[in-house]
Image (cartoon, helix red, strand yellow):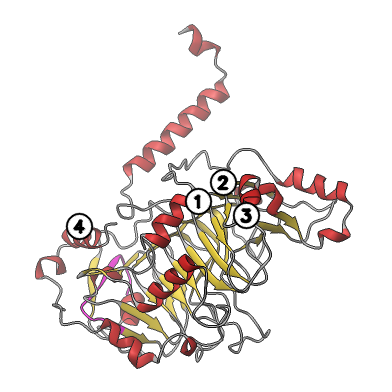
Amino acid sequence: MKLILQRSIPALLTGLLLMACQSVSAAKPMAFPGAEGFGQYTQGGRGGRIIVVDSLQDSDKARPGTLRYAVKAKGPRIVVFSVSGVIHLVKPLEIKQDFITIAGQTSPGGIVVTGSETQIDANQVIIRYLRFRPGAEHEQGDAVTSKRHHDIIIDHCSMSWANDEVASFYNNTNFTLQYSIVSESLNNAGHAKGSHGYGGIWGGQRASFIHNVLAHHTSRNPRINGYRLKPTYQQQDELTDIRNNVIYNWSKNSAYGSENGRFNLVNNLFKPGPAEGPLRFFQLWDVDDNKPAGQAYIAGNVMSGHDDLSANNLLAIKIKDEKHLDKAVVERIKQKFLVNKAFNDAQYPLDYLQQTALDSYQTLIMDGEVGANRTRAGIYQDSVDKRVLAEIAAGNATVGNGIIDSELQVIKGWDAYAQEFATTAASTIPAEYLNDSAAAQQWIDKLGAF
């Protein structure tokens, strides 16, 4: 009792608040077994009706049975697939209605979305085991993008062949991108600014990017957003966590940016490739001795083939146009920028799967536990993801230096690629799941288990 009385009232209130937040987190169901990061408690369409996608067609008008119809439907919903193959979008796929789970793992042979970008303009969204590959013929855009929304988790998806960024997610709240492949942006493919083969812009208020692969992009690997581009939250709440990813084969920039933001860059493996980009873990932009650079915790990262940089991450942290700054100014900027403890959010404390950068490389690249690698029939990885992972393992590229302008440089054609998803497996959805949301949730969780 004496010890309790000696504690300050503020300390007691802080402790009670932390316990209350932990209790709330504990009471919430996980998005699915294996969900990590700040988006792990996303509810998606849990408890909602089951909508079956039984057609690969798309049109301006959302027709029953199509993916567009499923995403435009209102109310909580779990979207499952009785078809396999390629969905050619006629215009961007806009997810605007909250509370949706899209379970690509229910497809008998797998789903590819091409022709245009997918825009997540909703809250409470779960997307798993889908491939988003727009292709060179689509208008300017990303493969998948979302900004200024909350409670989103994207898991085990494969994204590529876009002519802006491939996967940009920023200024969201409670967001996770995990176990996904972000590969082969299209460098010269019609972007208004010219060459634009970029990985993605990442950031947000409690935004996690964990166990992903970025490969074959000129730049933005990733571009950490920082506090800019019309955020909907206060600057002190900006927090981006990037850990246990593999970044391979950049030509201009690996990770950079984060103006006025806070981020962790922890236990990632950077592997230079034939595009021969600069050996950097991170580059600060738009800073000088009088401009705030934000703050970062950077530790445990590995630069493959460069033991000195792996042992001392500070050696691979640079400032843009650093050569024009006085050495003392450079040191002061870095001292203000770097902190010695990882950022977290006291109201949303997280327990991560603890992995070193080398362990993550084993999991993602050698074991292949990444990308849209499961269907209703079990584990399945398409030829695109197999090739990209093999190139990373070998440290090479199939075409040139790995930076491409068209998907037709790396596949024989869309008809041949579509044949990879043809299957004779059962296509109907088991009747016991169609009218029982709880049973359907258990089914999709089982199919998606990893």
Confirm or deny contact between disc 1 and disc 3 (CB under 8 A).
no
**Which of 416 and 56 lies nearest the eye of the viewer?**
416
Mark 2 lies on residue: 300
Disc number placed over residue 306 in the picture, else none: 3
Counting from the top left corner in percent of width and height, residue 345 is at: 53, 42
Badge 2 crowding class, 10 Å Cα cut-off, few under 14, some 14 to 19, many 20 or more, is: some
Counting from the top left corner in percent of width and height, residue 312 is at: 66, 45
Going from N to C along the chain, the mark reached first, 2 or 3, is: 2
357 versus 26 height, above or below: below
Measure how far apart labels 2 and 3 are at the Cα level: 13 Å
For badge 4, the amino acid type reads Gln
Residue at 24%, 58% in the rendered image = 445
For badge 1, the amino acid type reads Ala
* Residue 153 in view (yes/no): no
Question: What range of the chain is rendered magenta?
Answer: 73-85
**Outermost left residue:** 431
Counting from the top left corner in percent of width and height, residue 437 is at: 19, 62
Q: Secondary structure at mark 4?
A: helix
Measure how far apart labels 4 and 1 are at the Cα level: 32 Å
Measure how far apart labels 1 and 3 are at the Cα level: 14 Å
Say whether residue 353 is left or right of residue 311.
left
- Quadrant of image for the C terminus: bottom left
Disc number placed over residue 357 in the picture, else none: 1
Which circle, 4 or 1, is nearer the viewer?
A: 1
For badge 2, the amino acid type reads Gly
Mark 4 lies on residue: 442
